[in-house]
Amino acid sequence: MIIAIASDHGGFKLKETIRKHLAAKEGIQVVDLGTSSEESVDYPIYGKACAETVAAGKAQRGIVVCGTGIGISIAANKIHGIRCGLCTSVEMAELTRKHNDANMLSLGGRITDEALALEIVDAFLDTDFEGGRHQRRVDMLDEM
Ligand code: RB5
């Protein structure tokens, strides 16, 4: 599985932690789309880059991080075919996979501590979409 990751300066530290966490897993290739330091940058650029990579099929999943996770998730969700869930708990990560078939995860580097963030990442990667009644709703999202 190829996973694209990106952040702004507010999410840089957590994005680096996630990159190392993913690199240690077997069968996962990480594509890091930046940013590369804590110097101030604009989160829409990074949310868009990650979302376009996923939407183009160059990665199966995307993980984005900004200070709150809000701005970069808004950017990602503007790209057609992207369902990016902003999660602050393991339960939210499980449910955004089960119910929304989320293909991207957003996290807040200033909101969620590293240990919990890595648990959320693992739940996001390890949980399958339930389909059934949720498929109709995902199809409706994709038609928008
Ligand atoms: C940057 O200061 C901050 O606004 C950004 O990381 C994010 O929280 C926006 O939603």
Image: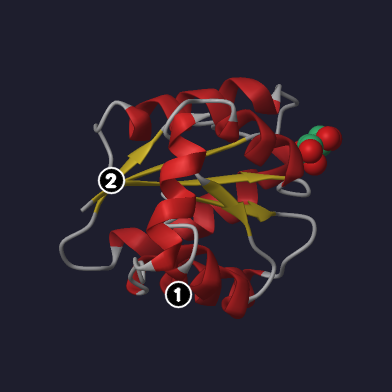
**Percent of width and height locating residue 124:** 44, 67
* Disc 2 target residue: 60
Report the front residue among 139 and 26.
139
Q: Which mark is residue 92?
A: none
In this rendering, the answer to whether 125 lies above or below 107 is below
In this rendering, the answer to whether 18 lies above or below 46 is below
Report the front residue among 77 and 59.
77
- Residue beneath the point at 71% across and 54% down: 108
**Percent of width and height locating residue 118:** 52, 71
Q: CA distance from mark 2 to mark 1?
A: 16 Å
Q: Which mark is residue 123?
A: 1
Give, as a three-letter code, the residue at label 1.
Answer: Ala
Report the front residue among 110 and 59.
59
Give, as a three-letter code, the residue at label 2.
Answer: Gln
Secondary element type, mark 2: loop
**Percent of width and height locating residue 4:** 37, 41
Task: Give left or right: position of 111 versus 61.
Answer: right
Task: Give left or right: position of 64 versus 143.
Answer: right
In this rendering, the answer to whether 127 lies above or below 2 is below
In this rendering, the answer to whether 3 lies above or below 56 is below
- Residue beneath the point at 22% across and 57% down: 28
